[in-house]
Image (cartoon, grey):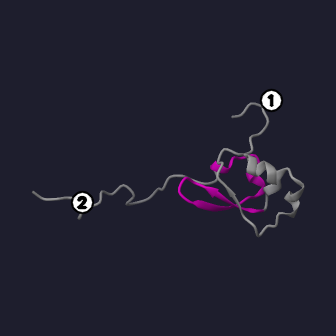
Amino acid sequence: MRSKWKLPFFSNAIAKLAFSPVAKQHSAKQTLKVYSRSSLIPEVLLGQRVLVHNGMSLVSVLLREYHYGYKFGDLVPTKRFGFGIHVEKTGKGKKKK
């Protein structure tokens, strides 16, 4: 939890887009690539599609009203869950004596 006397954190790329006069001209068809997962979601980007980096690839997220105030990293998982992820590979790598 960030203390109240500090201002909300935005990366430079998001701050330029969110607080510039060009922000309203930014069309909904263009997607913004976000690599800073610790930045807060500004109100200007609500209703737009954003690509958020999860450490391996960019994941598409549509920002809604209830996402306002959250961080971009909260919306995209970084780990894979499921069957067969930690299965040991067999075959070519092992040699028999």
Q: Residues within 10 Å of mark 1 (few under 14, many from 20)?
A: few
Residue at the spot 75% in from the left edge and 53% down from the top edge? 66
Residue 63 falls inside the magenta stretch: yes
Most distant residue in the bottom direction: 29
**What residue is shown with label 2?**
93
Is 1 left or right of 17, judged from the image as shown?
left
Q: Give the image location of residue 31, x and y in percent.
A: 72, 64
Residue sitting at 67 percent across and 50 percent down? 72
Side of 78 relative to 33 (left or right): left
Q: Amino acid at mark 1?
A: Trp
Between 67 and 73, the residue placed more toward the observer is: 73
What amino acid does circle 2 point to?
Answer: Gly
Quarter of the image with the C terminus is bottom left
Q: Quadrant of residue 26?
A: bottom right
Q: How many marks?
A: 2
Query: Disc 1, disc 2: CB below 8 Å?
Result: no
The extreme left residue here reads 97
Residue 68 placed where, x, y %?
77, 50
Rounded to the nearest angstrom, the CA distance separating label 1 from label 2 is 56 Å
Q: Is residue 19 above or below residue 47?
A: above
The magenta segment is 48-73
What is the residue that sits farthest to the right in this orientation? Answer: 21
Q: Is residue 27 magenta?
A: no
Question: Please, is residue 78 above or below residue 26 in the view?
Answer: above
Q: Indicate which disc residue 5 carries.
A: 1
SS at circle 2 = loop
* Image coords of residue 52 (percent x, y): 64, 56
